[in-house]
Amino acid sequence: MLPTTNPVLSDPAVRRTISLAVDRNALVSGSFLGAAQPVAGPIPPGHWADDHVAPPARDLGQAVRCSSRPAGATATATASSTVTAAC
């Protein structure tokens, strides 16, 4: 959880970029010695309020692309019709 009252972290694109850069598997295996599992949010798996959303996969390439976009930029299509995901 990131403090959204922070001027920088209030931008959803910044939070998404950070999320894409985090290696959750490394955190679990290193910090928790494998005794935990990566999650997408603050609600643990098995809890009645868990929505079973898989945590986003680490994608440093996308994180770099997101970090180089102006704040508030959205997805764009290229000439080859490939769509770059919004951050």
Image: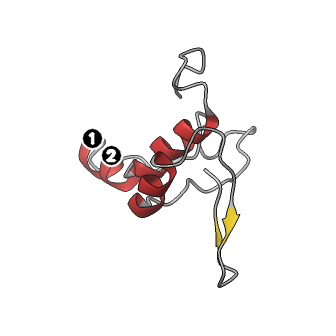
For the point 49% across and 46% down, which residue is it? 17
Q: Amino acid at mark 1?
A: Ser
For the point 37% across and 52% down, which residue is it? 23
**Where residue 29 appears, x then y in whole percent?**
29, 52
Q: Which residue is identified by label 2?
A: 27
Furthest toward the front, the residue is 79
Q: Which residue is identified by label 1?
A: 31
Q: Amino acid at mark 2?
A: Leu
- Classify mark 2: helix, strand or loop: helix
**Where residue 11 appears, x then y in whole percent?**
61, 31
Disc 2 + disc 1, Cβ < 8 Å: yes
Q: In which quarter of the view is residue 25 placed?
A: bottom left
Q: Nearer the viewer, residue 25 or 9?
A: 9
- The CA distance from mark 2 to mark 1 is 5 Å
| Crowdedness near tag 1: few (<14), some (14–19) or many (≥20) residues, C-alpha within 10 Å | few
For the point 54% across and 37% down, which residue is it? 15
